[in-house]
Structure formats: structure tokens, C-alpha cells
Image (spheres, coloured by chain):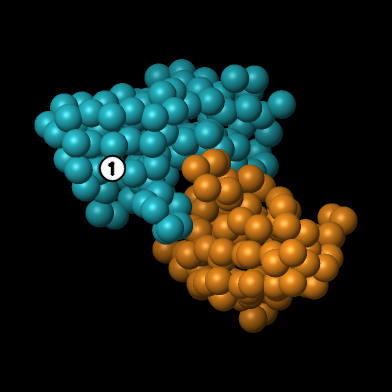
Chain colours: A orange, B cyan
């Protein structure tokens, strides 16, 4: 099955700075790579996703890059704000999702 | 659109009893539903995948006789935790995909189960 590794496990950034989270996956057949934001006790919220035929995707302050050759993808959040503080999960696959372990992001005001 | 609900949002039960959790797609037909379990400060772990009218496919290590999944219609799947024990206490989340053949999964709000 798919194995997704996510780093770092915790990330503290100053408000206004950028945050970068990296994930690697093992199954070269994976085609879909979503990123989720989860607040305590809430459902995961899809913030951006990318498919294997695209190398980069951006949505306002959030961007994702994908390197299929190296089997890694990254989430970039620019101009971080306190409301960006949450746990972020990467995931990979198409039919079934395998999740990374999560990154707790804290944005310091 | 693409709203998924779960009921109950939280439940407390005594050890040895059974608990049923419902997952409903409110505005679309869910061809596939997924059930996840999430322990505190951990990631989502897929328990099983269910397709309407078919038996669920369980992930390795998940006891199918303990976690009964029924997907009787295109808008409803249920997870029954049988003979619950304190170690079954967790956050259970369902998700669903529609008939549009996209990969995106729509998540329910989760059910917090506490077994005393």
C-alpha cells in the first residue's frame, strides 16, 4: 500500500512569514495529492489538491508543488496569519487516501 | 454542495455495548464511503471502504466482526462498533465520493466515541 511521510511534525512561524511542509510517498501509481487543514475536534478541510499531470498549483496564499520523479510534494503558505494555526495533513493516492502524520503549525503574532 | 453529515456528533457508552454511527450524503449520491478513525494527536487511519450494495473492504488489522459497516443506499452508510471497549474510544470520521468520478473525498464532521 501507499506510505506517506510528512515533515516537520511541528512548525512555528512568525506572522507574515512563510511555512513549508513536505511529504514523500511510495506508490508511483498515486495520482491525487490533497492537503487538509484540521482544527481541534473538527473535520479535515481540503485546502488545495494537485493531480499528477500538474507540477504546481496556487490558490491565493497557498501553493502546492509536486515532483513525481522524486515522489514528493510540498505545501507552501505565504504571509501566514494567526488563523492559519492548525494541523495540516498531506495525503496521496486516488481511490483510497493514505495520510501523512500531520504537521502542527503555530503562527506567532 | 457535497455535504456529508454524521450522527451522533458525540456518544458515551458503557463497555460491552454497541454503538451505531450514521454517515449521510445530503446533496449527492455517494458511490463510495470511507470510515476513518483518529486517535488524539494522530493522523486519520482508514478503517474500511464501502460501496453501495456491497460488502465493505476492511484495512489490514481492522476487525470486521467488531466494526460492522452497512452501505444500504447511495446516501447512507452506518458503522456499528460492537462490544465496545475503552480502547475503541476515538474520533470516527466518514467521507464520501460522488458519481462525478473525481478523487475528492467529502468528510463528515466526525463522531467522538467515549467508552467507559
For residue B116, what is the image quadrant? Answer: top left
Q: Which residue is located at x 40 percent, y 49 percent?
A: B38
Q: Where, by quadrant of the figure, is residue B78 drawn?
A: top left
Outermost residue to the right: A60
Residue A85 appears left or right of A97: right
Residue at 53% x, 30% y: name it: B31
Image quadrant occupied by the N terminus of chain A: bottom left
Please state the chain letter of the residue tagged with numbered disc 1 in the rendered image: B
Q: If the image is split into quadrants, where does the C terminus of chain A sit? A: bottom right
Residue A18: x %, y % from top left: 78, 72
Any part of residue A78 in sight:
no
Is residue B13 something that shows in the picture? Answer: yes
Q: Secondary structure at mark 1?
A: loop
- Residue A44 lies left or right of residue B50; in this view the side is right
Q: Residue furthest front?
A: A109
Is residue B33 placed above or below A69 in the rendered structure? above
Q: Residue lying at the far bottom in this picture: please name it.
A: A70
Residue B84 screen position, x and y as percent? 19, 35
**In the image, residue B66 lies at what x, y percent?**
20, 37
| B48 up-or-down from A7: above or below | above
The residue singled out by tag 1 in the image is B89
Q: What residue is shown at x 56% (from left), y 75% (from top)?
A: A8
Amino acid at each position: 500500500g501507499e506510505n506517506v511521510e510528512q515533515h516537520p511534525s511541528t512548525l512555528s512561524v512568525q506572522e507574515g512569514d512563510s511555512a513549508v511542509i513536505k511529504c514523500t510517498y511510495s506508490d508511483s501509481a498515486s495520482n491525487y495529492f490533497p492537503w487538509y487543514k484540521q482544527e481541534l475536534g473538527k473535520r479535515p478541510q481540503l485546502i488545495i489538491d494537485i493531480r499528477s499531470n500538474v507540477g504546481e498549483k496556487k490558490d491565493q496564499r497557498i501553493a502546492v508543488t509536486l515532483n513525481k520523479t522524486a515522489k514528493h510534494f510540498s505545501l507552501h503558505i505565504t504571509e501566514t496569519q494567526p488563523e492559519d494555526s492548525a494541523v495540516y495533513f498531506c495525503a496521496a493516492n486516488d481511490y483510497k487516501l493514505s495520510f501523512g502524520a500531520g504537521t502542527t503549525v503555530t503562527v506567532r503574532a | 454542495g457535497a455535504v456529508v453529515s454524521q450522527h451522533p456528533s458525540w456518544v458515551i457508552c458503557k463497555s460491552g455495548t454497541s454503538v451505531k454511527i450514521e454517515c449521510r450524503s445530503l446533496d449527492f449520491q455517494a458511490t463510495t464511503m470511507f470510515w476513518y478513525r483518529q486517535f488524539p494527536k494522530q493522523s486519520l487511519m482508514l478503517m474500511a471502504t464501502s460501496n453501495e450494495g456491497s460488502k465493505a473492504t476492511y484495512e489490514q488489522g481492522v476487525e470486521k466482526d467488531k466494526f460492522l459497516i452497512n452501505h444500504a443506499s447511495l446516501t447512507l452508510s452506518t458503522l456499528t462498533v460492537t462490544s465496545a471497549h475503552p480502547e475503541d474510544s476515538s474520533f470516527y470520521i466518514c467521507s464520501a465520493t460522488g458519481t462525478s468520478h473525481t478523487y475528492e473525498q467529502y468528510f463528515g464532521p466526525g463522531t467522538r466515541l467515549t467508552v467507559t
